[in-house]
Amino acid sequence: MQENLAGTSKAIWADGRRALIEWYRVNHRALPWREKPHPYAVWLCEIIMQQTRIEQGLKYWHTFMNTWADVHALASAPLDEVLKAWQGLGYYSRARNLHRAAQTIAFERDGVFPRSATEWKTMPGVGPYTAAAIASICYNEPVAAVDGNVLRVISRYVDIKDPIDRPIGRKQVDTFTAQWIHPKEAGTHNQAVMELGALVCKPKSPLCPECPLESTCINAQPALGTTPIPPIKMGKTKVKTVNLIFNVVTNGTHVWMRKRPAKGIWGGLWEFPTQELSLGSELPEQPPSEAKILPTAIRSRSQWGEPFEHILSHRRLRCRFVVWHIESEPILDQGQWLSWQEAEAKARPRAIDRCWERLEKSCLTLDNL
Ligand code: SF4
C-alpha cells in the first residue's frame, strides 16, 4: 500500500468512498434480505453464501426461510432435517454450526440476536467476516467485512504488493478497510465493496471504465477487460488424492447405511460403508472376492460400478462402488438396515449421492436389486 488515510490521500479515499456508495444505491442487485435487513435473514444468507454462488445459494435461502421462518423454528428442527435441506451445498459443518447457533440464540438468549461483531463471533460457525457483515448490515456497526471479493478490490485499489493470502498482505487490507469504512453507513459501504467485486472489479477482467473508483484507484486500467497486476497470491496447498470404495450391501429391498461421526468430514451424514485405500495404491480393476465388512459366513455376490472422481476443496476423491447382494439382514458394524426409500430420505454427502445416481442409471437399477 503506497499511502494510508493520513495526510493528503485521506481526501482521495473519501471521494472514492462517496462515489462507491452512490454507485451501490443505483446498481445493487435486489436481493430479498437487503431491503429491510433482519438479523435472522442476513445471518442465514451469510452462512449459506460462503463458498457458494449467489444464484445457487438463493434457492437454499428461500427453502430455509420457507421451512423455518424464524430462529425458534430452526432451533427446534431435527438436525437430520436441516442437513437434508442443506444437501448439495457441501461443507456440512456450516449446517451443523448454523443449527447449534440457532439453538444458542433461541434457548440460551431467549431469541435475542447478538448485535455487535464481537458478540456474533461467539456463535458457532461465525468468523470475523460473517460477524462484521451481520453487525454492519443490521446495526450499522463500523467494522469492515473482508471476503474474497473485498480482498481483490482493495488490493487493486490501494496497490498492495504483498500476497493477500498471507498474513503480510492480509494485514494491509485489514488496516486500510478499517480506516476506510464509512462511519455512519457501514452496512451500505461493506455491501457496496462486495457488490463492486462481484459486478465490476471481476477477477479476470475488471471493468475499470465503468467503476465508481476509477478516478481514485491506483490500478485503474484504461480499457475494458485488461487485468491489473494485483492481487498477488501464493496459491493453495497441494490437493491430496484419496481412493475410496463404497460398499452397497443390499438384500434387494433394504440397504445397509451408517451415519458418520458428528465431527470430521461429512459429519452426521449417511453413507454406504466406505473403505479408504492406503496412500499410493490404485483403485482395483476387479471387484474384491469378499466384502471385508461382511462376516465370512454370509454368502454374497458382487457387482462393480464405474469409477468416478469427486473434487473437494483440499482432496480429490477417486471413487468406485461395489454392490454386495446378500439374502439375509445380518447386523453389521455401526449402521442399520433401511428400505431404499428410507435411505433416500437421509442426508448424504454429495459423493454418496453421485454413487446413488450411478446405481439408478446403471444396470444395477434399484428395481433390479
Ligand atoms: S478501477 Fe478497476 S481495478 Fe480499480 S477498483 Fe475499479 S474495477 Fe477494480
Image: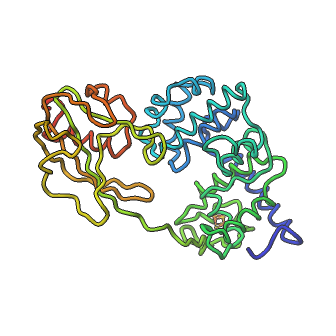
Which x, y percent locates residue 250? 19, 33
**Is 157 on the left or on the right of 328, as rendered?**
right
Q: Is residue 249 above or below residue 226?
A: above
Left or right side of 4 for 82 = left
Which residue is at the far right?
7
Q: How many marks?
A: 0
Q: Would residue 77 be found to the left or right of residue 153 on screen?
A: left
Left or right: residue 5 versus residue 277 is right
Task: Answer above or below: position of 185 versus 14.
Answer: above
User: Residue 63 in the image: x percent, y percent?
Assistant: 50, 30
> Residue 103, image x and y in percent?
62, 30
Q: Quadrant of the C terminus?
A: top left
Rendered image coloring scheme = rainbow
Residue 158's image quarter?
bottom right
Residue 304 position (above or below residue 335): below
Ligand 1 shown in quarter: bottom right
Instruction: Check the picture and name the quadrant holding the N terminus.
Output: bottom right
Q: Position of residue 259 (x, y in %)?
A: 38, 36
